[in-house]
Image: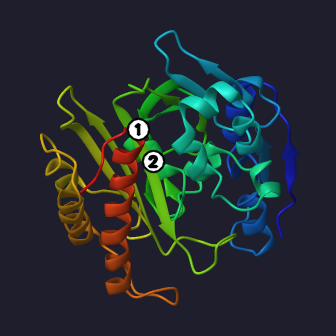
Amino acid sequence: MKELQYHRPVTVEDAVGILQQGDGRALSGGTDLIAQMREGRRSVRHVVDLKHIPELTSLTRSSDGGWRVGAAMPIGTLGRNEAFATDQGPLLASARLIGSLQIQNRASLGGNICNAAPSADAAPLLICLGAEAEIAGTSGRRVMQVGQVATGPGRTSLGPAEILVAIRLPPLEQKRSRGAYLRFTPRREMDIAIAGAAAFITLDDRHRIRQARITLASVAPVPLVAERAARMLIGEQPSAALFKEAGAAAAAEARPISDLRGSAGYRRTLVEVLTKRALGECARALGVGIR
């Protein structure tokens, strides 16, 4: 058994330096990592606690109305910021599906992304919103789309001495844009999604869909962007028939597996329904009646 060393750096540079020694793992809230270590699914020598780095636990708003969310900022703390809750209500709602209130006071958006679970609840809507991940490492900093972070279940594109510093959210056209995330679980609380669907639409002056994105959870090794389903919405007037068609297209793009929680066919059916409902929720929030 390895001798565990716990580190509590106060700067990004110090954290990267410790991880550069090798056999290390960054800890944000620890709600996934600690459980994995206890169960013997992960073994590391260096645990690098990021919660004491001010940059990783801060929330700032940019001059253009976007947000920079520290990767280790607890979801509970994030939700208590009234300006963020007002501007990013749907994203906050998806993040609040992660575990219990106690877990949300530890878990973070950054941890949900970097744990790279196919069933991650916050990642699909972050991808739909066009969120970016700010990464720090020995070679400096780089930025990538949040959708590029996960490469497979439990695997990311980050190097062994890289950490996710912040999530950048672009500004929203509040009166024209809306996102939503819906999932299906066997129980109402504290469970993993059998399938999930995030949707985002922007309307033009004629209430036609100018921009659309759809991202699916639990139906592929990583959050799956349903590009064909989103494309068919562009230029169209929101309607129940259109959203039903988009749901069917999203289900066709899904690549689910069959396991103890549900068959592949069941997951495709869920994707069809959840996508249709998420799109409808977006339209209704923008004041568009669906017929």
- For the residue pair 4 and 119, the one nearer the viewer reads as 119
8 w.r.t. 226: above or below: above
Badge 2, how many Cα within 10 Å: few under 14, some, many 20+?
A: many
Write the residue at 21% across / 71% down. Answer: 252
Residue on which disc 2 sits: 125
For the residue marked with disc 1, what is the amino acid? Leu
The residue nearer to you, when weighing 276 against 252, is 276
Quadrant location, the N terminus: bottom right
Q: Is residue 183 above or below residue 54?
A: below
What percent of the width, then of the height, locates residue 36? 72, 68
User: Which three-letter amino acid code belongs to the residue tagged 2?
Assistant: Leu
Whether residue 78 is situated above or below residue 67 in the rendered picture = below
Q: Which mark is residue 129?
A: 1
User: Which quadrant is home to the C terminus?
Assistant: bottom left
Query: Residue 247 appears in which quarter of the rendering?
Result: bottom left
Residue 221 seen in the current view: yes
10 relative position to 94: left or right: right
In the picture, residue 163 is in which quadrant?
top right
- Alpha-carbon distance for marks 2 and 1? 6 Å
